[in-house]
């Protein structure tokens, strides 16, 4: 079937299912435009979450709610924490322009995947970098909009520092019960966060720090070495079996 028809059916279904939630018209139009099958190979236009390459792929309904809360407009500079497969970044790029979208992910494999998917979807100007999301992307700050695709009890201070004075941040807040919220900087010294809108309950993976990502280096040495040994196989040498090195000969050049 024509992907354009499938996209229309998907968005029509979302607008009906989310009748109690706000589905922004611009967001709906962007989702009718972006080819989700370039990012999700299996049943791309069904409203369901999935997994790909160790990263969670958000259901289209969740994307619609998040972006409706984000209220991004053409020309806004947007930071997306959690690039995933790149679909959300592509929809945001349709709203604000490719060069205004910056995405970071702590999972290096996800970064490579997102870059390739965005390129195939015609959004190669979107910047995707491997970073600890809690640190944001300070060299490109401030951002008019920040979207966090991972849960935390409160927004990381670094992200609030990178939000423009009249900006907006959207994220799933709380744990284990989470609510998708939109917020702005509180009046005062800029360190506070006022929730200005709620977009329903949700369940996201927690915001990770370096060492917790899939395939990343563990802070715990025993954990790290056990995982590396397991990846090498049962007969992998543990260290002392390696050929002895005579350092006197090495230093003499022999």
Image (tube, rainbow, N blue to C red):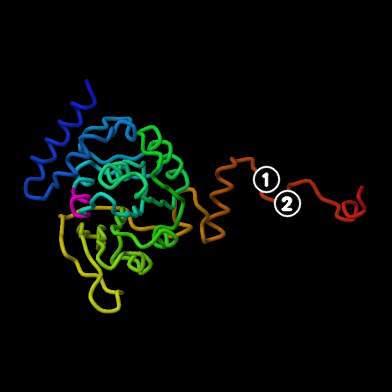
Question: In x, y percent, where is residue 245?
Answer: 82, 50
Q: Is residue 42 above or below residue 205?
A: above
Residue at the outermost top position: 1
Q: Main secondary structure of the magenta part?
A: helix
Q: Is disc 1 placed on a helix, strand or loop? A: loop
Give residue 44's quadrant in the image. top left
| Image label count | 2
Residue at the outermost front position: 75
Asked whether 68 falls inside the magenta stretch, the response is yes
* Magenta span of residues: 65-70
Residue for badge 1: 237
Asked whether 124 falls inside the magenta stretch, the response is no
Question: In x, y percent, where is residue 108?
Answer: 47, 47
Query: Which quarter of the image is occupied by the N terminus?
Result: top left
Query: Would you say 177 lies left or right of 19 here?
Result: right
Q: Is disc 2 placed on a helix, strand or loop? A: loop
Residue at the image point whose x is 24% and y is 65% from the top: 166
Question: In x, y percent, where is residue 52?
Answer: 37, 39
Q: Are marks 1 and 2 in contact (CB under 8 Å)?
A: yes
The one nearer the camera, 144 or 224, is 144
Residue at the image point whose x is 15% and y is 59% from the top: 198
Badge number at residue 196: none
Residue for badge 2: 240
Query: Would you say 184 lies left or right of 16 here?
Result: right
The one nearer the camera, 147 or 49, is 147
Q: CA distance from mark 1 to mark 2?
A: 7 Å
């Amino acid at each position: 079937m024509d992907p354009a028809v499938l996209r229309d059916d998907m968005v029509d279904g979302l607008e009906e299912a989310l009748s109690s939630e706000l589905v922004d018209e611009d967001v709906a139009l962007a989702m009718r435009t972006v080819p989700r099958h370039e990012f999700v190979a299996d049943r791309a236009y069904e409203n369901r979450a999935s997994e790909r390459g160790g990263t969670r792929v958000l259901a289209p309904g969740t994307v619609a709610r998040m972006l409706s809360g984000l209220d991004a407009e053409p020309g806004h500079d947007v930071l997306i924490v959690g690039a995933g497969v790149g679909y959300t970044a592509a929809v945001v790029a349709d709203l604000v322009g490719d060069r205004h979208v910056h995405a970071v992910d702590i999972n290096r494999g996800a970064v490579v995947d997102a870059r390739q998917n965005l390129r195939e979807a015609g959004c190669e100007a979107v910047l995707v970098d491997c970073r600890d999301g809690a640190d944001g992307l300070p060299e490109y700050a401030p951002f008019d909009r920040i979207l966090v695709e991972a849960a935390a009890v409160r927004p990381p201070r670094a992200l609030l520092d990178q939000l423009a004075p009249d900006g907006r941040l959207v994220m799933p807040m709380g744990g284990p019960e989470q609510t998708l919220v939109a917020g702005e900087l509180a009046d005062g010294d800029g360190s506070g966060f006022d929730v200005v809108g709620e977009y329903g309950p949700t369940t996201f993976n927690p915001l990770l720090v370096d060492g917790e990502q899939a395939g990343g280096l563990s802070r715990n040495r025993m954990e790290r070495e056990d995982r590396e040994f397991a990846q090498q196989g049962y007969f992998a040498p543990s260290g002392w079996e390696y050929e002895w090195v005579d350092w006197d000969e090495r230093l003499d050049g022999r």
